[in-house]
Amino acid sequence: MAMAWGQAALAQGKFPERTITIVVPSAPGGTTDFTARLIAEPLSRALGQPVVVDNKAGAAGNIGNQHVAKAKPDGYTLLLAYSGYQVGNPHLFKKAGWDPIKDFTPVAMLTRAPQVVAARANLPVSNLRELVAYAKAHPDKLNYASSGNGSIQHIAGELFKQMTGTSLTHVPYKGAGPAVQDLLGGQVDLFFTTPASVVSHIKADKIKGLAVTSNTRLTSLPQVPTTRESELKDFTLDSWFALYAPAGTSNEVVQQLNAEIAKILASPDVKKKAEDAGTLVDHMGPAQLGEYTRKELAYWGRVIQSAKISAE
C-alpha cells in the first residue's frame, strides 16, 4: 500500500505540485527547528513550491515522529529528525509508536553539532572544573534541563553525573526553546544542548558557556573551552539532524529531494549560517544515511543501557 501511494504520486504529475511540510518533533527555538528553517526557504525556491515548517512537540519527539510515520509516502510530509529522538527513543520507550528503520525512508543527512554545557548567568561558576566542585559542595541542589526524557540532553546530563560523581536533578521540557527560556530566567541551573539554542545568549552574556563536548573549539564560541581542555576528555557528544520521508516514498522523489538539498548545503551562505549557530553541514545521501542510522541505533542503545536511562 505504501509503495502504491508513492507510485500514484508520480503518476499524477511532476513532483512537487503543492506545499511540502517539514515536521519538527520539538518546540520552536532549538537546533532541530533551526535546521528545518535553514533548508526550508532555499528548498522552496529550488522546487518552486512552498516548504513550511510544522512544529509538533510532545512525548519526547514521539508525537511528531508518529505523525510522519503514518503520513502518505508521497514526499509532501517529511521529518526533520533529531538523533536523540531518532536513534535514542527506540531504546527508551517500549511503545514509541514508530520504528526508525521500518517506518522511514532516509533522504539526507543535514548537520551535526556538539553539546554546550550552559549555565544560568548568576550561577557562581565560570568553567567545568568549578561546576563539578560546586555540585559536589551542594549535592542535589543543582538541576539541569533537557528537551525531554531520553533526549540527548538527558543522556548528557546523566553521563556527566556518572563521570563526575555529582548529583543533579533532571527537569524535562518539550523542546530546547522552553528550556532555554527558563535557563535565561534562572528557573533551571544548567542545560546540555546544541549550540544553536544558546550561542546568541552566551555572546550576549545572558547565560554562561562552560564547555563544548567536542575535541575542538567552535568558531561561533571561540572563548568556550572543550571538555577535553576541561579534563573531562571522554565527555564528547554529537547530535545530528537529518531528513526522512515515510517508508514507501518513491526513490525518484527521495533522490530529487536529496539532490536539491545537496546543492543547498554546498552553498557558502548556508554553511556560514550553520557555523554561526554552532552546527556543521554534513551531507549524506539516502543510502549512506540509512547505513549510518542503523549504526547509530546500535551505538546509542549501548550508551543508554550503560547509563541506565529510561523514559518510562
Image: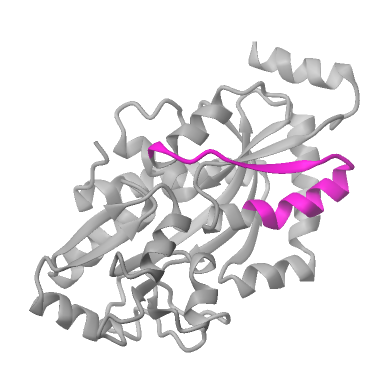
Residue 116 pos. (x, y %): 41, 71
> By what rule are the colours in the image chosen?
one colour
In the displayed image of the protein, which residue is found farthest to the front?
A: 185
Residue 20 pos. (x, y %): 75, 36
Is 173 rendered above or below residue 2? below
Residue 122 pos. (x, y %): 31, 82
Is 31 rendered above or below residue 247? below
Front position in the image: 218 or 143: 143
Image point 50% across, 48% down: which residue?
27
Image point 69% across, 69% down: which residue?
273
From the viewer's perspective, tell me whether residue 244 is left or right of residue 64: right
Front position in the image: 172 or 233: 172
Say whether residue 100 is visible: no
Front position in the image: 139 or 186: 186
* Displayed quadrant of residue 78: top right
Say whether residue 307 is visible: yes
The image shows a total of numbered marks equal to: 0
Image point 73% across, 60% down: which residue?
265
Q: Quadrant of the N terminus?
A: top right
Q: Write down the region rendered in magenta.
A: 36-59
In the displayed image of the protein, which residue is found farthest to the top?
A: 1
Q: Quadrant of the C terminus?
A: top left
Is 225 rendered above or below residue 85? below
* Displayed quadrant of residue 244: top right
Image point 54% across, 58% down: which residue?
31
Residue 86 pos. (x, y %): 46, 42
From the viewer's perspective, tell me whether residue 129 is left or right of residue 267: left
Q: Is residue 97 magenta?
A: no
